[in-house]
Amino acid sequence: MSIYLFLCLCLGFSLQAERNFFVMQMINVGARFPKEVSKDWVSHLGEITHIGTRQLYLLGRGMANRYVVKGDFLKSFNVPSEVAIKAAYTNDNLTVASAYAYSRGLYPAGTGPTLINKNISRAIPPYTGANFSEYQKQLNDSALPHLYDTVPIMVEGGGPDYLLSATEYCTGLKVMVERRRESEAGLKDKRSALKSKADKAFKELKDIFGVDVKSLEDSMKYRDYIESAKYFAHDMSKPITADSKAALDNIYNFVQFEEYYDDPLVAQVVSNEVLKEVETALKLGAKNKKKMATYVVEDRNVYAMLKLVNKGEVQPVPFASLLEIRITVDENKKYFVRAYFNDKPLHWKEGVTAIDLDGFHKWIKENTFEHKEFMAKCLEAKEEVKTKDTVWIIAGLCMVPIMLIVIILTIIYAVRKSKERELETAESDI
């Protein structure tokens, strides 16, 4: 019995002795309306749907249960210095709306602030065109109805260290990726295999979605439409079957490859800022006040990060998916880093789900760019593009006079031949 207790204590201690130190999250947006509308849809282009709102709210409730109720890691009310929620900049409200819904779940009703009596009379806007007394009674001492809180959502974007398309920010990145693809064995075969599956999928799905996809441009155009349709099968002429979903996944994988998000180099650039946030927390150690950083992004960013962390093939990223890097520390102040996708452990390398601090710093160094290093590579590739363009322009300019000479000589030759034929005709008439 004593041996059994000893073993239980030893095995249990190694698990219980670790406590959460820092959590980095990348969350894919909730289900959205497509950006392209067909006759079957009446929608707000690219905006979050009611389904997507609930998905993110429930995910937030799950995180509150993990890190507040069970984990005793976060406070039950919003502390801005403790949690940072960031939304990637997009042309629509999708990431911000998703982040807002998530924050509502993380800090649900009943967790917001109350006002002390002397401040209640001051908490009235100076607007004189309405009587606020009835609303004041309803609120009582709550700042917001049902004791909700306002959680800051920071909007990020504008450079290679942020969660936008790296290929859009640096055209030279495409050159770097293409150069690698040309030199690396097997990538052409991979593209061919992906395209073959996608082409077959287009044909399979034509009857369901009423979309005739004939080219890569069409696949990009309708990807969001097709992806969104999985959540609205009852609106379509035919239901989404298991075979149809497999076809959707084949299109998804091909598009990610063509958009370069399947590429490790792009993954490094996209993930740079997120991983630096983790490293900063580790450097601060005991002085670190921030416990959680949450980035709400689009699927391509989660896909790229997933490609980086989980070596090997990456499956499509469903709406409201969660990628986490959790850092724990034991009683000996030894740190461990683990990664999870929808709560399933990821492998830093084959068979390894947890790495220590030295291992993580080494991994960071191998898998991220310093800003100046990336910019140097980007500019170098851009200059290469410019040089090639300049060569082609010069070659084109050189060809112009040559072409003119050829045209003139051709005309002269044609005129001469014409005159010779005229003389021959005249002589034959004589």
Image: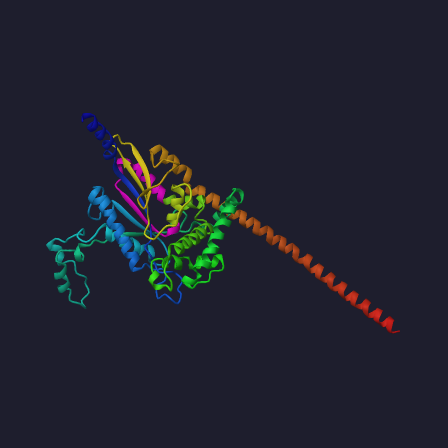
Residue nearest the viewer, comparing 391 with 93: 93
Query: What residue do we see at 47% from left, 50% from top?
Result: 194
Query: What residue do we see at 40% from left, 42% from top?
Result: 308
The percent coordinates of residue 243 (x first, y second) are 40, 54
Query: What residue do we see at 15% from left, 67% from top?
Result: 131
Q: Which residues are magenta?
A: 274-300
The percent coordinates of residue 429 (x first, y second) are 86, 74
The percent coordinates of residue 352 (x first, y second) are 36, 35
Residue nearest the viewer, comparing 256 with 419: 256
Q: Residue furthest left?
A: 117
Asked whether, in this view, residue 59 is left or right of residue 429, the answer is left
Camera sees residue 8: yes
Query: What residue do we see at 19% from left, 65% from top?
Result: 127
Task: Tell me if residue 285 is in the magenta stretch.
Answer: yes
Q: In this picture, is 273 found above or below 134?
A: above
Looking at the rendering, in which quadrant would you find the C terminus? bottom right
Q: Residue furthest right?
A: 430
Number of numbered discs visible in the structure rendering: 0
Task: Tell me if residue 198 is in the magenta stretch.
Answer: no
